[in-house]
Image: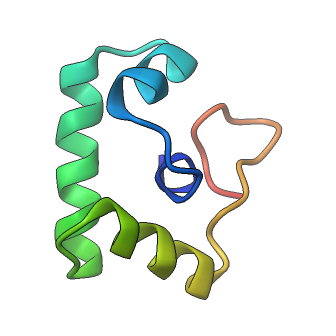
Amino acid sequence: MLPFLAEGMRNAEIAERLVVSQKTVDHHVSAILRKLGVRTRGEAGAAASRLGLTEVSAGSPGGLA
């Protein structure tokens, strides 16, 4: 899910892409922000890029590469 945040996708777009509810995405995004210690989606995207976590693996629609 973090790579999608880094791409600037909205929760509704992520939910559609992963075939999950928007509420599920909301929960995951909140957890990601908390775990990265950031406040915004933009900061999370920057952290993802810095950590090399921006690619989605081919075998997992929402997994990290």
Q: Number of labelled discs?
A: 0
User: Is 46 above or below relative to 29?
Assistant: below
Left or right: residue 47 versus residue 23 is right
User: Is 28 above or below relative to 60?
Assistant: below
Q: Residue furthest bottom?
A: 50
Left or right: residue 8 versus residue 21 is right
Q: Residue at x 54, y 46 (%)?
A: 4
Between 41 and 19, the one lying in front of the other is 41
Question: In the picture, which quadrant includes the C terminus?
Answer: bottom right
Q: Residue at x 20, y 36 (%)?
A: 26
Left or right: residue 29 versus residue 19 is left
Percent from the top left, x then y, of residue 60?
69, 36
Q: Quadrant of residue 17?
A: top right
User: Is 55 above or below relative to 27?
Assistant: below
Between 47 and 64, the one lying in front of the other is 47
Percent from the top left, x then y, of residue 59?
79, 36
Q: Residue at x 58, y 84 (%)?
A: 51
What is the image's colouring?
A: rainbow
Percent from the top left, x then y, of residue 5?
46, 52
Percent from the top left, x then y, of residue 15?
41, 21
Q: Quadrant of residue 42?
A: bottom left
